[in-house]
Image (tube, grey):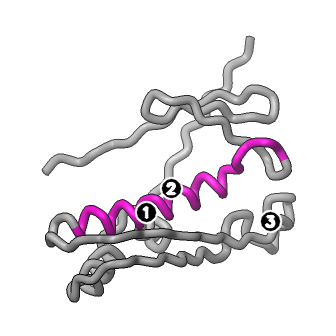
Amino acid sequence: MNMITFTVEGRLEGDVAKTCVAGKEVDIGLMGSDYPTPEEMLLASALSCMMLTIYYVAKEMNVKLDDVEGYIEGTMDPKGFQGDPNVPPGLLEVNYFITVKSKDERINEVLEQSMRRCPLKDTLIRQIKVNVKWKVEKE
């Protein structure tokens, strides 16, 4: 199977990042604004990825799910973002809380496989290669 590349475009308008995800505009702001923060969007992506992986694996194994609900939290020390060189600027811990209702005896196997196969959970725990290419334009 070929590799898949996901893309998101964005433009900063004042203190709001206007992004385009799958053809839909998503506004992202700073903490305290009326918009979700980048950290909240990361957590929303991670939680939805885990729940959709559970759905996918259950369907693959023909296991009926009655309900899947989730909650996720991420903890960070804002001093890192504010410039303290002794504190990492990103999330320090992420905790998933997921409730799955199913009468199927194979549900634990579904959950084990989902933990192993969830792309964003894997991305959060595995060191990945990140490249930033700057382009500075002077008018």
Callout 1 crowding tier (Cα within 10 Å): few <14, some 14–19, many ≥20: some
Sequence-wise, the earlier of marks 2 and 1 is 2
Sequence-wise, the earlier of marks 1 and 3 is 3
Which residue bears the numbered disc 1?
Answer: 120
Q: Position of residue 113 (x, y in %)?
A: 27, 78
Amino acid type at image mark 3: Gly
Asked if residue 36 lies left or right of residue 48, the reply is right
Sequence-wise, the earlier of marks 2 and 3 is 2
Q: Nearer the viewer, mark 2 or mark 3?
A: 2
What secondary structure is the stretch in magenta mostly built from?
Answer: helix
Callout 2 crowding tier (Cα within 10 Å): few <14, some 14–19, many ≥20: some
Question: In terms of secondary structure, where does tag 3 sit?
Answer: helix
Q: Position of residue 17 (x, y in %)?
A: 69, 35
Q: In terms of depth relative to the viewer, which is nearer, 103 or 135?
A: 103
Tag 2–tag 1 contact (CB < 8 Å) = yes
Inspect the magenta stretch and tell me whether residue 82 lies in it.
Answer: no
Residues in magenta, as a range? 33-58
Q: Residue 80 has which mark?
A: 3
Residue visible at 45% across and 27% down? 23
Splitting the image into 4 quarters, where does residue 94 fall? bottom right
Q: In terms of depth relative to the viewer, which is nearer, 58 or 128?
A: 58
Q: Residue 45 has which mark?
A: 2
Report the Cα–Cα distance between label 1 and label 3.
23 Å
